[in-house]
Amino acid sequence: MHLPFHDLNFATPDITVWNHTNHTEKVLIEWMKKLREYEGVHATLHGGYAWASEERDETIEKVKKRLTAMAAIAAELGVELLLENLIADRLNYSHHIASHFSEWKSLLDEANVKACLDVGHLLVMKENIEDVIAKLGGLLAAVHYSDNDGASDLHLLPDGKNSAVNGVLEMLQQMNFKGPIVYELNPYRYSLQDILHYVSEEKIAICLKNRKV
């Protein structure tokens, strides 16, 4: 489950906004309780953003404390809280958390949460996907899967041999990854049939390649 984030800035320094966020946290807890009713265990959260890039370090500490507290609540409910990697603000006016791998990895380690790897975000972040998956290791708990042009998060299906996400699903299979892989795709561009066809073809291709090996 992807927890709400548009109205929830987990990094806000404004106490009035944070009081509203505390109310929103109660809503998030209700969503996690509902998740458990359907035997779900993964809840993905965005880390929010600092209002100004100069506040980055102070804001990261706030997020770390809030994540740690939220992760403890989630654990009591039998839910694993995941932190998703975000795309940096290109103007460097604000700071999105976590939009750099080292920052993301530090928060995962210190706040006791797992990783939801958004592959499309990672492409825009200009990070090497295979290197990041290897560095995350056992922290990787879920994947948001899509392709783009490296400039914008377009939520595309991989297109042909030149796709930057080629080999990702195969790598996850080889490492015996058991978490959810969510296809985050543009609903105005693809039909459900398009997506199901791609998934089935991708599975067949991986199986055939493994047989050759």
Image (spheres, rainbow, N blue to C red):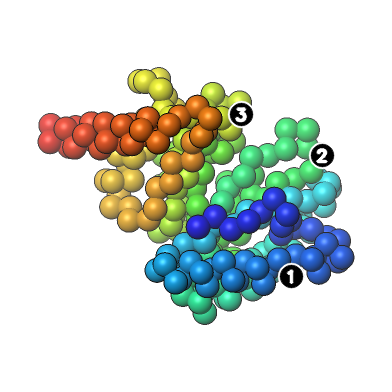
Amino acid type shown at disc 2: Tyr
Marks 1/3: CA–CA distance: 33 Å
Indicate whether 162 appears above or below 173: above
- Nearest to the eye among marks 2 and 1: give it: 1
Amino acid type shown at disc 3: Ser
- Nearest to the eye among marks 3 and 2: give it: 3
Q: Are marks 3 and 2 in contact (CB under 8 Å)?
A: no
**Front one among 174 and 186:** 186
Q: In the figure, is residue 193 to the left or right of 77?
A: left
CA neighbours of label 3 inside 10 A, class few (<14), some (14 to 19), many (20+): some
User: Mark 2 highlights which residue?
Assistant: 93
Of the residues under marks 2 and 1, which one precedes in the sequence? 1
Q: Position of residue 116 (x, y in %)?
A: 50, 52
CA neighbours of label 1 inside 10 A, class few (<14), some (14 to 19), many (20+): few
Amino acid type shown at disc 1: His
Of the residues under marks 3 and 2, which one precedes in the sequence? 2
User: Residue 127 has which mark?
Assistant: none
Q: In the figure, is residue 172 to the left or right of 117?
A: left
Marks 3/2: CA–CA distance: 18 Å
User: Mark 3 highlights which residue?
Assistant: 152
User: Mark 1 highlights which residue?
Assistant: 23
Q: In the figure, is residue 112 to the left or right of 58?
A: left
**Front one among 13 and 190:** 190
Of the residues under marks 1 and 3, which one precedes in the sequence? 1
Q: What residue is rendered at 74% in x and 50% in y?
A: 49
Which image quadrant for residue 59? bottom right
